[in-house]
Every structure is written in C-alpha cells, then in structure tokens.
Amino acid sequence: MDRLLVANWKMKLSRQEGITLAKNISDFFKDSNIKKSLSISIAPSMPILSEISNIILKSDINLAAQDCSAKDNGAYTGEVSAKILKECGCKYVILGHSERRQEQKETSELILKKTALAYKYGIIPIICIGENIYKKNQEDRIQELNRQLTPLLSLREYSNKELIVAYEPVWAIGSGIIPTTQQILEVAQHIQNIMKSASFTTNKNLKILYGGSVTSDNCQEILKISGIGGLLIGGASLIYDRFIRILKAAFEIENASN
Ligand code: PGA
C-alpha cells in the first residue's frame, strides 16, 4: 500500500474556501509525479462532499468523510448515512476522531457500529485513537490506548477488508508538539501487535497513520518510522503552500525508500 496523506479540514473552511483549495491542490497534483507514489485524500465538510468530489476525482485524489451515522437508514434527523457518503464518492470515512469522542461522547461501541456500516457500503474506515494527556511512561500510554484499541479486535470478521488506524495523541492535535519518534514507533508496534490477532497486518490490510501537529518540517521524520503508512493532517492541510510542502517532503521520503 502507498503512503496515504489525509487532509482533515474539520469545520474550518467555508464552501468557497474549500472549493478554491481543492481546485488548487487538484491542479498541482494532476500534473505532478507525486501521484505515482503517494495517495492523497481530502475530508471536507459534509455539504460540499459532492462538489469537492467532482473537483478532485480527475486528479486521482480521493474523498473522505469526517464521520458517518451509526444507523443504516431511517428517521434520524440530522444524521448522514454511510450509504449516501458512498454515493457522494467517499472512499474513506474518519471515525472516532478525538474531537468527536470528547464533544459528542462517542464510545468504542458506537464507533464499531459506524465501522460496520462503512464496510457494508464499501468505504474504508480510518479509526482514530490517541491518549488524552501526555504520558511520559510508555506503559501508561499503552494502557490508555488499549481502551480504544482492544474493542477493534472485534473487527476480525472484516479482515478480508482494509483498515486504517490513525494514532493521534490528543495533546498533540493543534498544539505544535509531537511525540518523539521512539514514542510513535512504540505505539505503531503496539497497534501492529494487537491488530495482528484480528488478522490485520501492515503488509496486507492494515495501514497506520500518525496525526497531530504534522508540518512539512516534521513529516519526513514521522514517515520514516517503521510501521507508519501515512499522515492525518489538520491545520497544515488548510493552507495551500503548507500542504504542498508536506506533499513534496513526503514524496522525497517515498522515493528514497523505493
Ligand atoms: P492538526 O490536527 O494537524 O491540526 O494537529 C490533526 C487532526 O486532528 O486530525
């Protein structure tokens, strides 16, 4: 699997800002060598999914949603189903982002329901996990992560499909502070060890992303970490120049490792 870079726009851009940014990224990407070795995905706000899809598809950039409903269909005012996300062109859906775990009190159980519906409609889930506060001690960090990670073992029944797990320490999101490469490596190894028992492995059907204060300055170091298959990028994906610098830096690493 190629390295994957996912731009998580959150609720930060207007419709017009999103359209302009998607056009610019798309124009850059379609004529660039970068697309031969990197996969890119953009996760805009729900109401502009179809519009953004039309802009980016011709450049081989994929669409992602930032969430989906845990219900398949029915009288659920305000919810957005996995089925309609698929119809809008989504290849991926971000699930269990810490902002939703915190603000919407999303539980692992709810996230697993959403995951099942994503799979039902042929969407690849990007499930976010991450410890809330900085834990210096590796054992404490792993213990906290396990509360979000071990429920994913029930996904064994989907091991014929792809799964993406994004490690996003909550304290690193938007803070400008990132874990050491050793810490990210240890977590990536732990995710691999746990998910192996549900038949998800990084050389087959599991990709591990890192997210939290990714920039063009730190992305190469992160992408060199064994087991890390890509990045989930928030703030730095909202500004064209910053995002393109990350793409170029990631491409250098990809070329160097081929
Ligand atoms: P950030 O956000 O890159 O702005 O830290 C990442 C995320 O929340 O996915």
Image (spheres, helix red, strand yellow):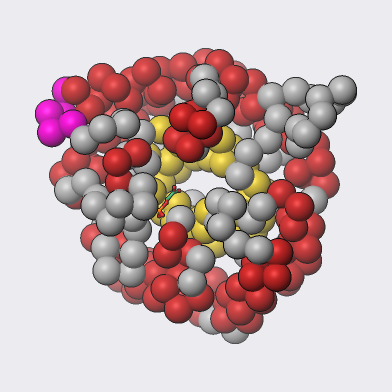
* Farthest residue, direction left: 137
Query: As displayed, is residue 105 above or below residue 239?
Result: above
Q: Would residue 257 be found to the left or right of residue 19 on screen?
A: left
Q: Where does the image place residue 73, in percent across and percent down from the top left? A: 84, 25
- Type of secondary structure dominating the magenta stretch: loop
Residue at point 64%, 70% (across, down) = 17
Q: Nearer the viewer, residue 153 or 56?
A: 56
Q: Would residue 77 be found to the left or right of residue 67 on screen?
A: right
Q: Where does the image place residue 23, in percent across and percent down from the top left? A: 66, 76
Q: Nearer the viewer, residue 152 or 23?
A: 23
Let me know if residue 136 is in the magenta part. Answer: yes
Residue at point 52%, 58% (across, down) = 7
Q: Where does the image place residue 150, in percent across and percent down from the top left? A: 40, 18
Quadrant where the C terminus sits is bottom left
Q: Is residue 145 visible?
A: yes
* Farthest residue, direction right: 74
Q: Where does the image place residue 246, in percent across and percent down from the top left? A: 39, 69
Residue at point 75%, 23% (across, down) = 71
Query: As displayed, is residue 238 above or below residue 47?
Result: below
Residue range highlighted in magenta: 135-139
